[in-house]
Amino acid sequence: ALIVDIGAGTTDLCRMHGAIPSEEDQLTTGKAGDFIDNLAFDLIKKAHPEAQFTINMVRDAKERGSFVNDVNDKAIVTWPNKEGKPTNFDITKELKEACRAIVPDIVSGLRKLVSSYDAEFQKRMLQNVILAGGGSQLRGLDRLIEEDLQQYGGGKVTKVHEPVFAGANGALKLAADMPEDYWKEVK
């Protein structure tokens, strides 16, 4: 399997193949949630110079209604204008562009991890890409990555069921199965 964990500061990609992953099995990119927030902030500032907003307001808008696929949904926010009057702003285009900006690095990383693995299992690995982390909640991200993977013969991307707690749940399972000798090393 290939795990893509999209957090706030980094997107971590890891190839899982029945053993504890080594350095060669992992890649990290700095394009993640904070990158999206900052890019969206800049794009919105450029498109709507009359709007008053903060990075936290952009993050909130992203978390409430971001999507990367082409749908009829609109991301409309009510923020103060330069005179302080609450005004509706359509930030759909800017949010979508910012959210999509992480996809090329993810696909490139996936391809790098797959191409450096045993050729016999490469296609199978691309059929088991798992999105995790807060960024995995971007609507349509799984389909957009699948579309991009078409250039490499296709792939299947699924999302974890509880992206916010999946890491903690996995750590708990590992801890429960950890041999007692390993616990002696923890200080």
Image (cartoon, rainbow, N blue to C red):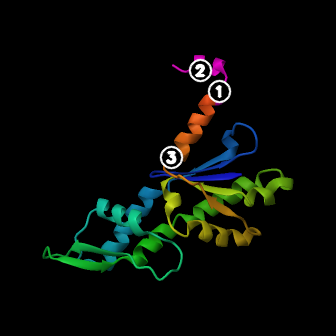
Q: Alpha-carbon neighbours of circle 2 within 10 Å: few (<14), some, or many (≥20)?
A: few
For the residue marked with disc 3, what is the amino acid? Phe
Q: Secondary structure at mark 2?
A: helix
For the residue marked with disc 1, what is the amino acid? Met
Start-end of magenta stretch? 177-187
User: For the view shown, which residue lies furthest in the bottom direction?
Assistant: 72
- Toward the viewer: 172 or 108? 172
Which residue in the structure is indicated by mark 2? 183
For the residue marked with disc 2, what is the amino acid? Trp
Which residue in the structure is indicated by mark 3? 165
**Residue at horizontal 64%, vertical 63%?**
107
Task: Check residue 88 for magenta coloring.
Answer: no
Q: Alpha-carbon neighbours of circle 3 within 10 Å: few (<14), some, or many (≥20)?
A: some
User: Closer to the camera: disc 3 or disc 2?
Assistant: 3
Q: Secondary structure at mark 3?
A: loop
- Toward the viewer: 170 or 9? 170
Q: Quadrant of residue 41?
A: bottom left
User: For the view shown, which residue lies furthest in the right direction?
Assistant: 120
Q: Alpha-carbon neighbours of circle 1 within 10 Å: few (<14), some, or many (≥20)?
A: few
